[in-house]
Every structure is written in C-alpha cells, then in structure tokens.
Amino acid sequence: MSYDNIKKPELLAPAGNLEKLKMAIIYGADAVYIGGEEFSLRVAADNFTVDEIAEGVKFAHERNAKVYLTANIIPHNNDIDEYGDFLKSVKDTGIDAVILSDLGMFAITREVAPDLDIHISTQANNVNYKSAEMWYKLGAKRVILAREMSFDEIKEIRERTPKELELEAFVHGAMCISYSGRCLLSNYMAGRDGNHGECAHPCRWKYFLMEEQRPGEYMPVYENERGTFIYNSKDLCMLPYIDKLIESGLCSFKIEGRVKSEFYVATVVKAYRTAIDSYFNSEPGEYRFDERLLDEVKKVSHRDYTTGFYFGKPGGTEQHYESSSYIRNYDMVGVVQDYNEKTKMAKVVQKNRFFKGNKVEFLRPYGDFHEQIIEYMTDENGNEIEVANHPQSVVYVKCDVRLEPDTFMRMERKSKGE
C-alpha cells in the first residue's frame, strides 16, 4: 500500500482552559477545540473569555496549530437571540472554525461571519452519507460523525460524499449512553440540561428497583450478578488501531475531555501523536503498534477501555457494572519550569506530595519518558529537603537528563499493603 493517497490526519485535542490549550499543542496536537463562556456543551470546563480566545489562537497559530470554537448546544429561542452577539464578539479573534449542531445557528453564522469555517457537531446525529452531503451543500467544511459509527459505515460515508468534505470522529475518551449525546436523563432527574452543557452524568449513578406495593424497599439491579451500574460505559480508546483509523478516510481524530486535567491531555495527545507519526514513518505495510503507548494512556485517570462501535455494535462487555469510579494508578506530582545544565537541577512546581527516594517518571514533550529515583532535592532557597509537601511551591530536583519546560513529573501510586 502506498501513502501517496493518504493524507496525514489532524490530531484534535480538548482544551478546557488556556493552560490546557497550550499543553495540548506543546505535546503534539494539530488543533484544539475550546468553549467560550456561552453556547458550549461543557459548562464544567473553565472555558474562555474573548481575550483568552485571542491569546489561545495567537499561541496556536504561532505553532501552526488551529483552534475550533464549540457552540453546539441545542438552542431555544433566547439562545438564538443571543448567539449573533456572541459570534460578533469572537469572530475577529482568529478562530479557525465554529462547531455547531443547529441549523438556525448555522444560518446566523453565515450572516455574521460568512468567511468562518463551520464544522457540524456530533450532536447533529450524523450517521449517514446523505445527511453529511446535505451539510456540505449548505456550506459546512467538516462533519463530525456520531460515536455510533462502525468502520464499514465510515468507509461508505467517505466513498459517497465529496472528497472536499472533511470527516472527523472521536477516537478516545468518555462514551455517552445516549445517541450522539442527546440525553434528557440529567434534565429530568437533576434539573440540569445536558443539551445545554450542564449534564449531571446520571448514567454513572447506582440504581435500584422499587416495586409500587413496597415503597422504600429497594432491590439492587444486577446483570449476571456483576453489579448495578447499568448505564456506565467504558471509555473509548482506539490507539491500538491507529492504522485502521488512518486508512478509514477520516481527516481528524478527536480526543474527548475538556474537563480533564492538563496531565491527561498531555499524556493522551502525546501517545496518539507518537502512533500517528510512527505509521507515516514506517514503510508501507510495515507499521506495528507499540504496546508501550497503551501503557501510557493507562497512566491517566480512566475507566476500562473499549473500541465502542468501530468494530460493530457493542455487547454487554462494553459496560462497567461494578463501579463508576475511575482507574487511577499514577499521580502527577509536579511540572518542570526550567532546567540548569550546570547544576543538573530541574525547577519543579509541586502539585502533589513526593519524597526523597521515590521513583518518578518525567513525561517530556519530546522523546521517551525518563525514569529515576529522587536522590537529592532542595527547597526554593537551596536547603536540602526530604519531602516536597506544599502544593504550588517550587522544588529543585536533581536530574542528569536535560528536561524541557512543561515536562510532567508523575509517580505510580502504591497499592495497599506496600
């Protein structure tokens, strides 16, 4: 197989705030998607002011990366009335595209910012080629496919739509129990509208059954005696199948997680960046997935992984019935700000506690991570210390390997009994 007809896909990362935007790009993202203070489906994220959007765009463009602004709520009349003013306030920041799910907001965007690219959100339930083709005829540059698509369906959409239409799909992150994220459960049970970005995630809650003649008598809901979390999906991870994703015709691989940490974004982005680059650096037909990359994405907070709908409709094994908790085997304990070549000391801003004698790993923007035992460290005044015990304080750590700024320092959690 030749790579001549395969364009290198865009790696698209989440950015819940300005710091996460910068980390995503530093660790290899080609583009980021962000939310403004209105019209985004992630109110739990910090989101961006107009000035922060402009600063983020400047940072990205200086590094040949793009910024897409999400405005993909399902709008009511008052939202429509306000969207035009919101768009006027952000259209000159330099954003590369706006992500929409609603036809009315599409029309307003065409009127207010006719030169701005429009991407159609997964919230628009794009599951067939005719829908994708229609959005293209209306002027959309890209369609973000629903998570409920298989490789075979993606291939057919690619073959039956104009080649100029870009296709994007989620490849990593949390899965929604409802079709393309359109869910009323949160609104009904908690008064928080998931379609306005306020989801309370009731799909992760624990449920019991109550019979009407026995009020107050709760019976646990079991499936094969494995547990009670009947809506609790595993997380999507397509990293081991990066070759199939590339060959599917998708132009953009999207990572979910605007409310996740900077450490999460950096770790996952770097793993996918490495896999994509490795594919294109290999001779045609010779690419082999490096299993160490899967180990990397298991070092961030996550649920068990699944391939979602890519290989067909999921069965019972795609749900996690025992618990809604995340798996968290590593902690991010610090971020490197600077490195002194002469003294071999790294300036680290502490995030979590660590001790002299701890084994740590340094996740670097480039190259493999570096593992070592902390043999010597000092406080900001040069006094040797045995423990870094004050979050946000500066600590100097001896390291014989040069560390770039924005390197993450992580440490494996000890299991009980150690």
Image (tube, rainbow, N blue to C red):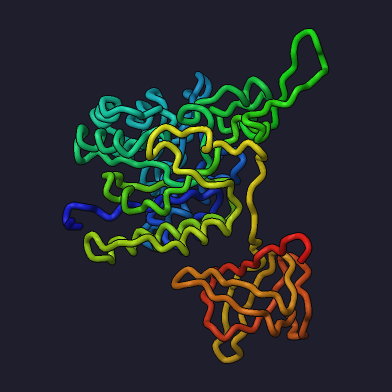
Q: Residue furthest front?
A: 224
Q: What residue lies at 66% left-to-right and 61% top-to-bottom?
A: 331
Q: What residue lies at 67% left-to-right and 40% top-to-bottom?
A: 323
Q: Mark yes or no: residue 308 visible.
A: yes
Q: What residue lies at 75% left-to-right and 22% top-to-bottom?
A: 219
Q: Nearer the viewer, residue 239 or 259?
A: 239
59 w.r.t. 216: above or below = below
Q: Residue furthest top?
A: 213
Count up the numbered dots: 0
Q: Nearer the viewer, residue 279 or 80?
A: 279
Q: What residue lies at 69% left-to-right and 26% top-to-bottom?
A: 221
In the picture, residue 344 is in which quadrant? Answer: bottom right
> Residue 233 appears at what percent x and percent y?
55, 37
> Residue 404 appears at what percent x and percent y?
51, 75
In the picture, residue 324 is in which quadrant? Answer: top right
93 w.r.t. 310: above or below = below
Q: Is residue 294 left or right of residue 285?
A: right
Q: Is residue 65 left or right of residue 259?
A: left
Quadrant housing the C terminus? bottom right
> Residue 83 appears at what percent x and percent y?
47, 30
Q: Mark yes or no: residue 85 visible.
A: no
> Residue 120 appears at what percent x and percent y?
37, 34
Quadrant housing the N terminus? bottom left
Q: Is residue 264 left or right of residue 3?
A: right
In the picture, residue 300 is in which quadrant? Answer: bottom right
Q: Residue furthest right?
A: 216
